[in-house]
Amino acid sequence: MQTEIKNEWIYEQSPNEVWAYLTQADLMALWLMPNNFVPTLGQEFQFITKPIPSLDLDGIFHCEILELVPFQKLVYTWKGGSGDGIFSLDTVVEWSLEKHGKGTKLLLKQWGFKETNLAIFNAMTNGWNQNVLKMMNHLNEKK
């Protein structure tokens, strides 16, 4: 089983503009989920969505910022479960931004999936693509 999601997207916007959508709670909510994100190393935060009983997820993803390099890199944990305090999903999400011509190359890696996470892995692989395209649409609307 594959245990890592990897993807990349190219944006016409600068790394600073893309970074805002990765680190400002109100902008993150536009393309991902409501959250209480604060861009501070070691900060714990949550993403909140509807419960997904078929995936044994209560809809609250518990995260902690592990690495923060402004306009270049953001790494945080991504944990979820049924709400009983036991995390059936315990992964790490890494966003990297690189200059690409006048725009930005955005890279995503999420790793740590276990065999028991196969359904979640498949859902998140598709979900990241759909959500990042939402971010791209919001960025393009700002032009």
Image (cartoon, rainbow, N blue to C red):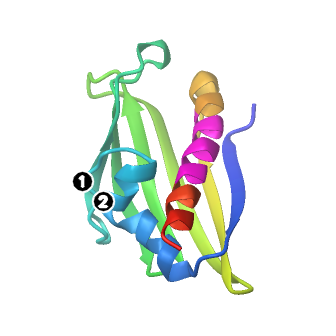
- Residue placed most toward the observer, 120 or 19: 19
16 lies left or right of 107: left
Q: What secondary structure do most residues of the magenta stretch adopt?
A: helix
Residue in the image at 26% along x and 65% along y: 38
Disc number placed over residue 25 in the picture, else none: 2
127 lies left or right of 51: right
Which image quadrant is residue 42 in? bottom left
Residue 117 vertical placement versus 68 (above, below): above
124 lies left or right of 47: right
Span colored in magenta: 124-134
Residue in the image at 65% along x and 39% along y: 125
Task: Judge whether residue 70 is colored magenta.
Answer: no
Task: Judge whether residue 133 is colored magenta.
Answer: yes
Q: Secondary structure at mark 2?
A: helix
- Residue placed most toward the observer, 28 or 64: 28
The image shows a total of numbered marks equal to: 2
Residue in the image at 35% along x and 22% along y: 51
Q: Secondary structure at mark 1?
A: loop
Residue 113 vertical placement versus 27 (above, below): above
Give, as a three-letter code, the residue at label 1.
Asn
